[in-house]
């Protein structure tokens, strides 16, 4: 019942020990590279699809999208935004008319960073949709920010000027107010704060309503945006 | 005879030496990811894959791995399987992967897995080692699932996301929060220990009766 009974009599040379570990590490490395390479396309495609679905969800009536970044004082369309570069997604309808922006935003929630995407129509200064992309809010309480249909639905026509205010449930009276979720006040206020902060940060960089960058050739813009 | 031996190795992990209820191993994933049945199953399957794969390799190479570096070798093997499981889940079921979060990479630190390599796989032939690993992994899965099911039913009024009760059911939110994990596990361990106690008592009585009978 002793381990490695055949090794008990004499201790193996250091060379043997080192080479065993080196071989094990080498095989393990090859296996990891293999699985990484073989799953990467699926993972990237999943992420791109998730983003597209989220954009289409927060901007009703949109059928094409393209990534927009702020460079040299204006908003320009790019195929692939640089890493860590703030990006918004322009949504366009079938007539290639501009509908609105889908704006990613993130900020601290109750437990960890909440990342959301919200749809914004600059002409009417309205938030028209909100989707939580990432959050670790408490299950059963904070996770209502994406499970509570009433709360999510409240973002479908919400005035963003001067700013969104979360109020106690049932006391909403103005178009820029939203009912906070009972039991998840901090999480719902966090979502509101994240949108307000992103709005403030972007409002100077977005062009005047009507002057949004037009969509580039349909094929590449709709397939490559967001990858 | 041989068949019985494999069966014995399998069933001991599921029941008598259940990694959670009898050995109280792997508590970290046990408490952390059992807030819903589906998370519990995903974690159980990932652990199953890692444990069976590692046990197979460790047992196959047990004569080549020098004793002095065995733990390092076990960890390399386990970590490789964990990484494979991590990427596979991310590619196939991104939603579940998101829920489980950091606990997939942490399978590597599950003492149940390293424990089986050291205590069993490195000393027994491959066939028995794989049977032992399957038994332990199934035992772990059963334990995870029973905790996850209880917590999801009480805490969310649902099982595998299907609502079980009418709208009037007020979920015990505490059951899907961390304290619910401790409460449920405590009650289940209580039951298992009571069962074991009763069984020992019964066996003693039988022995007593036999002795006095002769």
Image: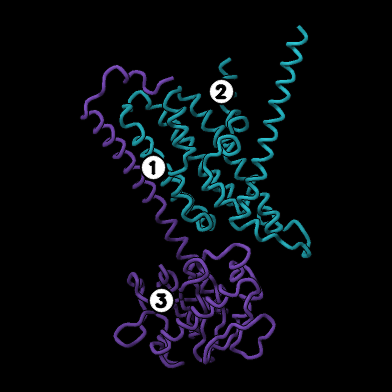
Q: Quadrant of the N terminus of chain A?
A: top left
Q: Quadrant of the C terminus of chain A?
A: bottom left
Within 10 angstroms of label 1, few (less than 14), some, or many (20 or more) residues? many
Within 10 angstroms of label 3, few (less than 14), some, or many (20 or more) residues? many
Please indicate whether residue B47 sits to the left or right of residue A14 in the image: right
Please indicate whether residue A28 sits to the left or right of residue B144 in the image: left
Name the one closer to the observer, B140 or A203.
B140
Name the one closer to the observer, B132 or A203.
B132
Quarter of the image for residue B157 reads: bottom right
The numbered mark 3 sits on a residue in which chain?
A
The nearer-to-camera label among 2 and 3 is 2
> CB under 8 Å between callouts 2 and 1?
no
Quarter of the image for residue B169 reads: bottom right
Chain that is cyan in the image: B
Percent position of residue B138, x then y: 58, 37
Query: Looking at this rendering, what residue extends furthest in the front direction?
Result: B212
Name the one closer to the observer, A157 or B8.
B8
Residue at label 3?
A67
Residue at label 1?
B80
> CB under 8 Å between callouts 2 and 3?
no
Percent position of residue B43, x then y: 54, 47
**Chain A pictured colour:** purple
Would you place residue B214 above or below residue B114 in this image? above
């Amino acid at each position: 019942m002793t381990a490695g009974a055949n090794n008990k009599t004499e201790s193996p040379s250091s060379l043997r020990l080192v080479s065993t570990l080196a071989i094990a590490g080498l095989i393990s490395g090859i296996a990891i590279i293999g699985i990484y390479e073989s799953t990467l396309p699926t993972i990237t495609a999943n992420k791109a699809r998730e983003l597209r679905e989220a954009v289409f969800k927060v901007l009703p009536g949109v059928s094409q999208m393209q990534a927009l970044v702020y460079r040299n004082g204006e908003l320009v369309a790019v195929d692939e935004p640089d890493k860590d570069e703030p990006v918004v997604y322009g949504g366009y309808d079938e007539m290639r008319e501009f509908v609105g922006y889908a704006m990613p935003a993130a900020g601290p929630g109750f437990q960890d960073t909440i990342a959301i995407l919200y749809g914004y129509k600059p002409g009417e200064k309205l938030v028209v949709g909100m989707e939580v992309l990432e959050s670790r809010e408490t299950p059963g309480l904070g996770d209502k920010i994406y499970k509570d249909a009433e709360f999510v639905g409240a973002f479908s026509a919400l005035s963003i000027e001067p700013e969104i205010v979360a109020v106690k449930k049932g006391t909403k009276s103005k178009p820029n107010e939203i009912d906070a979720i009972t039991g998840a006040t901090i999480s719902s206020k966090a979502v509101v704060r994240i949108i307000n902060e992103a709005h403030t940060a972007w409002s100077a960089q977005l062009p005047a309503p009507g002057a949004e960058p037009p969509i580039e050739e349909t094929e590449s813009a709709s397939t490559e945006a967001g990858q | 005879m041989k068949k019985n031996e494999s069966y014995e190795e399998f069933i001991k992990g599921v029941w008598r030496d259940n990694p959670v209820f009898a050995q109280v191993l792997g508590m970290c994933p046990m408490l952390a990811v059992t807030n819903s049945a589906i998370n519990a199953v995903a974690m159980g399957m990932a652990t199953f894959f890692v444990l069976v794969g590692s046990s197979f390799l460790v047992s196959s190479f047990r004569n080549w791995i020098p004793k002095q570096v065995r733990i390092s070798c076990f960890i390399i093997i386990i970590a490789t399987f964990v990484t494979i499981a991590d990427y596979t889940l991310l590619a196939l079921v991104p939603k579940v992967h998101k829920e489980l979060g950091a606990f997939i990479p942490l399978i590597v630190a599950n003492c149940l897995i390293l424990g089986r390599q050291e205590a069993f796989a490195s000393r027994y032939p491959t066939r028995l080692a794989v049977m032992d690993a399957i038994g332990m992994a199934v035992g772990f899965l059963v334990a995870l699932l029973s905790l996850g099911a209880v917590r999801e039913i009480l805490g969310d009024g649902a099982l595998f996301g299907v609502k079980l009760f009418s709208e009037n059911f007020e979920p015990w939110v505490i059951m899907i929060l961390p304290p619910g994990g401790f409460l449920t596990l405590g009650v289940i361990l209580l039951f298992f220990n009571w069962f074991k106690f009763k069984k020992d008592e019964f066996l003693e009585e039988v022995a007593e009766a036999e002795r006095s009978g002769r």
